[in-house]
Amino acid sequence: MNKIRLLSAFAVLLLAVGLAGAQMTPRGGTVVVSDGEQLVGKNFNPFSPDPLNFTDRFIYEPMLIFNPVDGGVATPWLATGYEYAEDLQSVTFNIREGVMWSDGEMLDSGDVAFTFNLFLTVPATDIAAIRDFLESVEVIDDSTVQFNLNRVYTLAHELIGSQMIVPEHNWADVEDYALFTNSEPVGTGAMTTVADFNEQSYTLCRNENYWRMDESGAQLPYVDCIRQVLFQGNDPANLALINGELDWVGNFVPDIEQTFIAQNPDKHGYYFWPGGATVQLYSNTSKEPFSDVNFRRALSMAIDYEAVTSIGMYGYTSPANAVGLGPRYDSWVSADATAYADSTGQTRYNPDGAMALLDESGYVDSDGDGIRNLPGGDNIDFKVQVVNGWTDWVTSVQIMSQNFQDVGLSATVETPDFGAWFSALQNATYEVSIGWGTAGNTPYNYFRNLLLSELISDEGVANAETWSRWTSDEADALLSAFTETADAAQHMDIVNQLQMLYVENMPAIPLFPGPTWYEYTTYRFTGFPTEDNYYAQGSPWERNSAAIVISTIHCIDDMACGQ
Amino acid sequence: MTTAVGKRAARKPDDDPGMLTKLLDGVYAIFKSRFLRRRFVFYLVAAFAAVTLNFIIPRLMPGDPVQLLFARFQGKLDPRAFEAIKEQFGFVQGPLFEQYLLYLRSIVTLDFGPSIMGFPVPVAQVIGSSLRWTLILAGISSVMSFLIGALLGVLAAWRRGGRIDTILLPIASVFGAFPYFFIALIAVYVLGFQLDVFPTSHAYNTAIRQDWASTEFLWSVVYHMILPLFTIVVTATGGWMLGMRNNMIGVLSQDYIVMAEAKGLSDRRIMLLYAARNAILPSLTAFGMSFGFVIAGLLLTEIVFSYPGMGYTFLLAVNARDYPVMQGIYLMITVTVLVANFIADMSYVLLDPRAR
């Protein structure tokens, strides 16, 4: 009797000590998000072109997470690790043990093999083009899967590791994978229960079986639910953000210090990490005078980059370096390429230099009308395109076209609608245009999408960002060499050479690294990434980061936790 | 007063059979009418032409849906995925004539298949959820602005030079001439944002469940509708008011009005049953026609108030070159406009014997 009483008293004491020792993170609450999603259609099929945003890494998860702030280093997720074979012809992933699907079944290597066999056998599901390099999938044991490649391709782990893994027991009987909308998803993610769905919002709630725990052993996520609210464009969403109706947003907000922060500096926060793809000025090198590298170089010297970033972009970013690699790729920037750019003076504001270079290259005002002429005699007269309504870019382009006029070129701004603009870029019917670049774990994707000749189709359609149509055998060779080695030093060397090609030939003029839009309010939740503690990219549309953020934030008081 | 009521009640039994016979005569005339038969053939041809144009026009826009899908991802979708997307979007990639036949079949079966921007969600679902809100908001706002406008127009004409005519009519006309989005933005900014009296977005509070049996939900719908409704009615009333007033003035100079006055009928009776009843006919026709365009949606209202609806769905579809969704919405507009016109034609036959 006594012994038992003593024991139970001891147990109570231990429990009390334990509770006092571990600060319990408050749990509960519904996070309200607007990440720019606009269309409703109940589609949680991760292999359709544009499923609901939360499908990705909230419902389904990949084997690896590539957090953009980690410089391309993979975070083990559903896999605990991966390893290439000696001959680089295969890569083996070790599947995490103890991960449960939201319906209670266990995840195993069979699910992973099923997912990749789906890509191999049903072309419509292969939205990531895995078949391009994957030959076959082998289950080694319950927690090991080997991927056999059809060639040496050292980016395989990035692509394989980023695919959403779907449950075999739930997906094997689907009749038509292309038309499958998966309205009752079963996933391994943090938020798998579809609690509400209508034409202006949808709500996902926690997966009671979620596998991730915090240091104290408490199950993640701390929040109960997440609601995506749809807005008809940026302005109403920004109004709701300023009103404190939204917790987490990824929008462009003009003059944010005044319009948003000043409303409540304690509870409103933002950080536009300049880790996005570099925004560039493209010119159509299949047309005169843009085919002349000296003309492109002169253009790059005519642009007032400070004015573009401080006025057009509200000071949210700063001018790009000469090689177009943003702060995310600092360690990759080539000293040789930078020195070359310094010697020519390109991509630095220097109107006199631009005029001198134009004169020297034969683009002089031969008929005295104030506008420079082509050597053949025609006035140099071109349109700079920008998408109608993209106000930050429109202002930037207006500044640049003024800059071009200042050096004697007749440049006017044209603002077609998105579809017409994109079609002009792809089909080479434009002259000059502002456009995005590609961000990736390494600078490889940026150069590949800009320079790889096979991205221009036989019919002449320029895919990805090959809009300038400047290609070379040398660039093609470097790009394929990059994927054939896993050696970091060789990667660095190849990227150096690509940067050298870039500065010598100027396929595009780098303007500024893209700011990544991200705002948050702390009326109800805390733990969002801040400039000082930027543990992941804040933008809710960056899905790798979102998977980390959703399991980090928590409610702050009883009211927020009860919602 | 009492005598008037008594008279009306006493007269009713005589009037009713006469009215009914007249109405039946009219309906008979509609069926017999050569005019209408000709019109019907015209409508069939017009419908076919419209349906074909609905197919051609979206495809004349530069840019195709698959390319634009890649554009939407801004480089995040690998160009190598092209093949998978083509595989999925096979239905918009075939030869044009084949697509046209498929399109005609989809009109007959009313099954437009999967949408492109929300692939593989069916077109019916993409349109369906927003159609409900368009019908509610557009229906209530057009009936309200028509009724208020017509009534005020009648009163303005009846007391020409009175306060309604000289003060309210110019004000309403000025509001009607204002760009709509300007008034809507001011309403959102002042009433919604600065004073915080009304919500600034959505058709109901997104934190509560959509449940048409719950009073909390219904109240939220009403509360969210006040501001958009107010802005539409304020801008749309002026047009109806002016039209109605001008019609009324024309009618008031007719001999039968003088006759009615001479008979000593009450002002209200002359105004509403003699004058307004005739004056409203042209406005009613215009109202019927305007209903067709309501389907296309109140795009600006939807954008300013983030109100779910067809207008914005249509805009998204155009931007994505989502042919199936565009075709579905076009078909609805075409059918509504044609039906409204046909009803207007029939009412002409009913009202004007010369058209028979």
Image: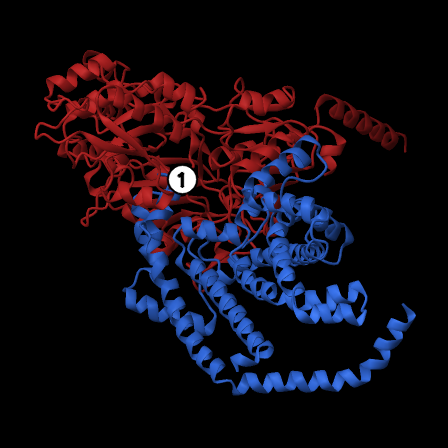
Residue at the image point whose x is 64% and y is 43% from the top: B171
What colour has chain B? blue
Residue B347 versus residue B326: which sits nearer the camera? B347
The residue sitting at the left extreme is A376
Asked where in the image residue A146 lies, by quadrant, the reply is top left
Q: Position of residue A405 (x, y in %)?
A: 26, 23
Q: Residue B56, how many percent across, how many down?
A: 34, 62
Question: Can residue A231 be seen from the camera position used here?
Answer: no
Q: Nearer the viewer, residue A224 or B101?
A: B101
Q: Residue at x 60, y 63 (%)?
A: B283
Please give the chain letter of the residue carrying mark 1.
A
Image side of residue A259 versus residue B215, left or right: left
Q: Give how far across and how far down residue A228 sits, in percent.
A: 58, 42
Q: Secondary structure at mark 1?
A: helix
Query: Is A339 left or right of B245, judged from the image as shown?
Result: left
Image colour assigned to chain A: red
The one nearer the camera, A7 or A210, is A210
Could you tell me which quadrant the N terminus of chain B lies in? bottom right
Residue A401, visible in the rendered structure: yes
Q: Which residue is mark 1?
A: A161
- Give the amino acid at mark 1: Gly
